[in-house]
Amino acid sequence: MDFDDQSVDTSQLDDRRGMGVGTGLAVGGGGLGIVGLVIYLVANLLGGGSAGSFALSPEQAEGGAGAAEVAERCNQEGAIDEFDDCFVLKVFNEVNEVWTEEFDRRGQAYRPPRLVYFEQAAATGCGTASSQVGPFYCPADQRVYIDLGFLEQLQQEFGAEGRFAQAYIVAHEVGHHIQTLTGAEREVRRAQQLSPSQANELSVGLELQADCYAGVWSALADQRGNVSITEAELDQALRAAEAVGDDRIQQKAQGRIDPESWTHGSAEQRRSAFLTGFRGADPAGCDTFTS
């Protein structure tokens, strides 16, 4: 996967690695990750809880102690290819650059989210989260949270391997940020409260739309020269989308499939949603709630 430049912008990063946080495992009130609550439910680890107030030190809120080190290391020649944290951050930069241009083209303002690197657990605007929820986005503080160690484990265990698989994961989470900016996330949460029996179905729609947005970003980034995507790399994203389908995860974790409990969509649905976005290259084509 080739980028149009090798510059890594660390101003979008909060690096909390090595910073301790409470041991609570609750995640509440926010956007879900690619695997998110599915792993929690399958493994019976979800501890309830709800979004609450939290306090970060000024160092945590403004990038963390490691931000300066990341800035120096990631802007050295070859660092993007060598280090996962540099690569993921570079993808995050490019995702935000493309969406900024796309929103501007449509006469709209884009407010980029922030990226948080953490280890084991993190305090978020949506409660305290364990890395076991996988990469996730919290709409309350508009941040994407990634434990790089768990991301590697996720890729190995579920077959979501390859550099562009990582790019897909980042783009999916920023897709949830797009939903926050457009109001879709808020509307879905309200609809879930009004009709609890449709909560899972609505959640699937939200996740598939984020997959579609990831496909849109991939196409636009390739067309505009931000990144150069090969057929093999596109296949990595498609295999990653399939790997984190609810049916694949349930079959692997519990040996059976329960469609009624799905919150993210099947392997085929997730692959199809990404392809819809990639082929259409238009966020307006990502209506996953009326089909």
Image: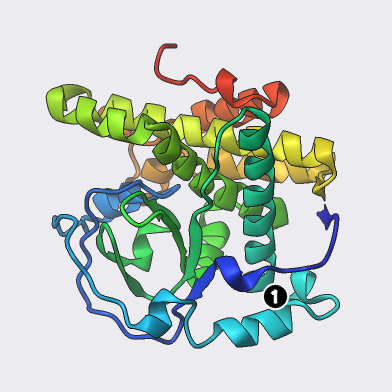
Name the colouring of the figure. Answer: rainbow
In the displayed structure, 214 sits above or below 199; it is below
Residue 236, position as x, y percentages in the image = 70, 45
Can residue 130 be seen here? The reply is yes
Q: Regarding mark 1 in the picture, which secondary structure is present there?
A: loop
Q: Position of residue 14 (x, y in %)?
A: 48, 72
Where is residue 6, by image quadrant?
bottom right
Q: Does residue 18 appear left or right of residue 224 in this picture?
A: left
Residue at image x 43%, y 32%? 182
Residue 162 in sight here: no
Placement of the N terminus among the 4 image quadrants: bottom right
Determine whether, in the image, residue 93 is placed left or right of residue 140: right
The residue closer to the viewer here, 281 or 180, is: 180
Q: Position of residue 23 (x, y in %)?
A: 22, 77
Residue nearer the viewer, 130 or 66 = 66
Residue 199's x, y, as percent? 23, 29
Residue drawn at the location 63% of the way across and 65% of the way down: 89
Q: Is residue 278 left or right of residue 76?
A: left
Can you identify the residue that label 1 sits on? 83
State the residue lying farthest toward the top: 291
